Image (cartoon, rainbow, N blue to C red):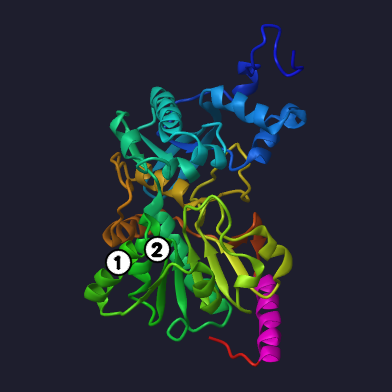
Amino acid sequence: MSPYLNAKGRLPVLNRKVMTRREKRPIDFSFIIHPLDIEDIFRKFKFMRSWPDNLVKAVMRRVPPIFTSNITGVRSPHSSVEGCFYGVPLTSQQMLELPPEVTIRKVIAAGRKAAKLGAKIIGLGAMTAVVGDAGITVARNLDIAVTTGNSYTVATALQGTEKAAEMMGIDLDKAEIAVLGASGSIGSACARILARRVNYLTLIARNLPPLEKLADRIKQDCGLAVKVTSNVKDAVRRADVIVAVSSAADALIEPEDLKPGAVVCDVARPRDVSVKVAQQRDDVLIIEGGAVEVPGNVDFNFNFGFPPKLAYACMAETMILALEKRYENFSLGREMTVEQIDEISALAAKHGFKLAGFRSFERAVTKDVIAGIRERARQKRAALGMGMA
């Protein structure tokens, strides 16, 4: 018998005392999270590190949604709310490999548990917002509101991209801008908003017909003629600024794909930018879209890799809607409107949510760090006979 099976020859079941960490309390909202990779599982369940990966995944597939922590102290000038995290214990890779209905059932189960605690709205995090029909089936099977947070994710990603480009000395009026994953919900919205601001825009995705349709819509909306391509490498290598929002399971941007001084806002989870870029390219700026400062003395009681008071934009959207008492489905499905993005941006400003600097591969990016990147890019471009955008 395998040493990893119990006396009855079955996979082990986690003790409930291990699975619940804090006393549950009445809440207004909940946010559904999941481990991005198996290392995230090991951080919570350290005793599993010696187990084979396949066993870990098999056990976690059987584990029900896990109450992770309370979220306290979210307070704006107009209102205050409390919430919680619920964890669906499947990695990003599992969610891509398993039938969508498996993940969706677990997300619905998490939503129902949150509703019993008083939640009137839930936010879907990372791959739970992508799998299946992007939250529509989840919303149909719950009696509370659901949002993916995509609208505010787009808003903050574009705010961050514009600020980062400015700090790197890039003139957006003259720069080559690319949207990777432009045929998706977030990507198409990013493209439409960027088209109001820039002059040279390329849309990138695997399938050209949706891109061509989007290009026609942009031409009608604001008169900008945009390029479309399915050649990721070629388009990325020509771009000065890239907004990466694909739903690919593996990294699409490698160290050799970026020109010196390029800025990439990587909103995708899993990331579109390989970790090798951070290791090998000190002349490009990679930022993670959607790092937001939450108003009030917020305590998440859980470490998801951000400093105190900071959250992903998708989390923030759930809080904003709860503060506004807008208990309604907001960002759902594959379609997203510019009007939605503008509306959530206005509500965020009303309640005191704001862009909170930059992060890259789980680390803060300071002004001094950016100044160093800019100088190294200048030197490299000069050596190659290249000018700045």
Secondary element under disc 2, as helix, strand or loop, is loop
Q: Position of residue 120 (x, y in %)?
A: 35, 33
The answer to whether the residue labelled 1 contacts the one labelled 2, judged by CB atoms less than 8 Å apart, is yes
User: Within 10 angstroms of label 1, few (less than 14), some, or many (20 or more) residues?
Assistant: many
Q: Looking at this view, is 199 or 146 the one in front? A: 199
Residue type beneath disc 2: Ala
Q: Which residues are magenta?
A: 367-384
Q: Which residue is mark 1?
A: 214
Report the predominant secondary structure element of the magenta stretch: helix
Q: Position of residue 142 (x, y in %)?
A: 32, 29
Secondary element under disc 1, as helix, strand or loop, is helix
Q: Which residue is mark 2?
A: 182
Classify 275 as above or below 315: below
Residue at position x 54%, y 44% from top?
298
Residue at position x 39%, y 48% from top?
320
Q: In screen coordinates, is 161 left or right of 186?
A: right
Q: Which corner quadrant of the image does residue 215 belong to?
A: bottom left
Residue type beneath disc 1: Leu
Classify 191 as above or below 347: below
Q: Looking at this view, is 222 or 233 the one in front? A: 233
Q: Which corner quadrant of the image does residue 195 belong to?
A: bottom left
